Amino acid sequence: MGTAKETILIVEDSTDLRECFSECLTDEGYDVTIAAHGQEGLDYLEQSPNKPSLILLDYMMPIMNAREFRKQQLASSKIKDIPTVILSAAKIPHETLKSMAASAILQKPIDIDSLLEEVKKHLVNRDEV
């Protein structure tokens, strides 16, 4: 990690998972922002002066799902380059994943060590760019 704290946006409709991921990532020294659905996440991204370093995005959510979130994210020059990891309990077709241009996918249930490893991998890769 760099000298400044990395910020991670968690977009997840499950309160339990949001809290679990948030607590684990905070314990690792990350700043965490949470959103309960895609529209809330997009609103945060468009309004916040600071972009997160990474987005953890649940695939199936009410109000706005991951596909629509990614469509709008990729269309916005302000937020399109933020790495986004999809979290899903469902098996997502390869074509769908490809069209979403996700940085990675983690299948639920998610092992916390795997989550932390994926987060670190993306933040290290981002720092090297």
Image (cartoon, helix red, strand yellow):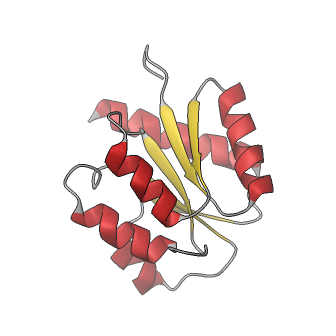
Dividing the picture into quadrants, the one containing residue 19 is top right
Quarter containing the C terminus? top left
Residue displayed at 42% across by 39% down: 52
Give percent across and percent down for residue 46: 33, 50
Asked whether, in this view, residue 59 is left or right of residue 55, the answer is right
Residue displayed at 28% across by 56% down: 80
Give percent across and percent down for residue 30: 58, 28
46 lies above or below 107: above
Give percent across and percent down for residue 71: 33, 72
Q: How many marks?
A: 0
Dividing the picture into quadrants, the one containing residue 69 is bottom left
Residue displayed at 64% across by 41% down: 116
In the orientation shown, which residue stands out farthest toward the top? 3
Asked whether, in this view, residue 6 is left or right of residue 115, the answer is left
110 or 75: nearer the viewer: 75
Give percent across and percent down for residue 17: 75, 54
Residue displayed at 76% across by 56% down: 15
